[in-house]
Amino acid sequence: MLNEKDIISTLMMVREQNLDLRTVTVGINLTDCVSHDLETFKRKIYDKITRYAGQLVASCNRIERRYGIEVANKRISISPIGVVGAPFSSEQLVEVAITLDKAAHELGVDFIGGFSALVEKGMSKGDQALIDAIPQALTQTQRICSSVNVASTRAGINMDAILKMGQIIKQSAELTAADDGLAAAKLVVFANIPQDVPFMAGAYLGIGEADAVVSVGVSGPGVVKAALEKALAEDENMDLSRAADIIKQTAARLTRAGELVGREVAQLLNLPFGIVDLSLAPTPNRNDSVGEIFEAIGLPAFGAPGSTAFLSMLNDAVKKGGAFASSHVGGLSGAFIPVCEDLTIAESAANGTLSLEKLEAMTAVCSVGLDMVAIPGDTSAEMISAIIADEMAIGVINKKTTAARLIPAPGKKAGDIVRFGGLLGEGPVMAVNMGSHENRFVRLGGRIPAPIQSLVN
Amino acid sequence: MNKALISVLGNDQPGIMAAVATVITDHGGNIENLSQTLLQSVFGALLMVSMPEDSQCAELHEALKQVGQKLRLSIHVDPWDEQLTTWQENPPEVQPYILTVIGPDRRGLVAEVSTQLARHGVNITNIQAIFKGGKNPMDNLMVFEVDVPRATVMQDLRDALHEVGQRLDIEIDTQHRKIFESVSNISN
């Protein structure tokens, strides 16, 4: 017999606190599809993806009904196209992206991630072609996401790649000017990218992964907020040790739900189960916001002094809870702080409580980085590269993942609103200090060497 | 060995179990299993008792009746032949589900829901009602723990329950038990 408290708390998590399976992501290795012939390659990847993920949506729907938990997104991650599509030109790789988009539509999946390159130390011919293809690929498709890893703690920071990515982001945004630069919202630049992220836009299937694998991304900032509010209502003198415990326990419960669903979907698809990525990933809805957790714990607003301290605690407690609940936690696991996808964070950015500089400081202790940040359309490519370089340095030195998903919204200036719709949400354009100035530093190029691993201070 | 099923019902107070069990022991009986519950202020217990071959249920019943009068309890003793029902004899393969009914109390709610469950071959293993009143839907909740045979088409069952829910203006959800267990029980 289940006890009343357990039944009610599980029901509340699902019904009122927006616990959802943000994504079930099937990773599919495409290395056995390689070919010098474009048509052969396109046919092979289309066939393999539709074969392995053919039942993905149906299986998720079945599990959804069985457990009464929504699987919000069904996604696919693939081997980095910069590697498996290495023989092709950038024009040909745009065709590959269109083929992938067709597969996504055919299967009814929301996104395919892995139009990606790993260039932290250097750029191969295939990587170069892929990066050049990104603006057109993301403009001509709807469901393709792209990521480029430009830095790692072991390799250092590839400044040539970062300089290039500034231009690519700018071009991507300009090609989709009518949609506020939407293509740039599907492109993310990484340091220390994990091989098994199920979340977009950074999902790809690493080279060290299985032929095909099912991973899940669980979210539920609303559940954490509700748990903290309840604890504070019961004991208004609750201290932060207790708050950390509550976050940990809540994270553990969320992870359990995720692992259960992930394993069942994997079983239905007859594929191995990979990892649970427990990330507090907001959606642009009330009660599903990471920013609201900051208000619940007593900060005047997201971005106010104290925010970095609380974010570090939140991120750490989420990881601890997740790691306790499942031995297969991976991906990004922690707290996301995307601006446009989170109502409260977007509000803070709009009313000036949160500046780009404070946000950057906070990314030193969150699980991703500068995420879904709209910046003025006249920000120069060089300045975009410089922002990326700063963000990558934070990740490289701190041995963590950082990322930059910046959208230079064409024709928009600081304070204007951009709207991307759906999960990508909407938010204000954030001011970039000296955004249109020249920046000779990033033009110097080369590599920033990998950091020393001793003398830690 | 004779077996008997004894049911005890009445307002709760200390000493009910002591009085009942003592009479059973004095008549040579042995309590093999028992379950006791409290429904608001009402005590209810079900006892499985084995009696010596030569003993009569009637005598035990008479003795317990006197206890019942003293403590204002309704006590019944029935001989039990342990004959299994068809469901028990040929237990089908089942999946455990939790059915939750959210919304204010409605006349006929239990009848309607359990009739649909029976019609679809579903066995109820436990029912809990949590009626605290007020407007919070979570304070007006009925929980049916059920075993659903493999032969039952879940969608048909859901459709039937959905129809009941619409008619009575309540929300009925059916979720596999595992989700409650995995979320609630961290050490499993």
Image: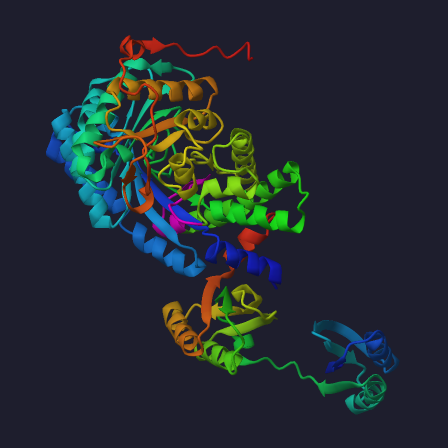
Q: Is residue A166 placed above or below A338 in the rendered structure? A: above
* Residue range highlighted in magenta: A265-286
Tell which of A117 and A406 is nearer to you.
A406
Q: Decide whether residue A14 is among the magenta residues.
A: no
Who's the residue at 43% across and 55% down the image?
Answer: A69
Who's the residue at 50% across and 12% down the image?
Answer: A453
Residue A210 is left or right of residue B134, and the answer is left
Tell which of A416 and A240 is nearer to you.
A416
Label count reads: 0
Q: Decide whether residue A278 is among the magenta residues.
A: yes
Residue A201: where, in percent of width, then height?
A: 32, 35
Residue A4 is left or right of residue A125, and the answer is right
Question: In the picture, residue B6 is in which quadrant?
Answer: bottom right
Q: Quadrant of the N terminus of chain A?
A: bottom right
Q: How is the image coloured?
A: rainbow
Who's the residue at 40% across and 40% down the image?
Answer: A347
Residue A46: where, in percent of width, then height?
A: 19, 41
Decide if residue A17 is in sight here.
Answer: yes
Residue A351: where, in percent of width, then height?
A: 40, 36
Q: Is residue B114 placed above or below A145 in the rendered structure? A: below
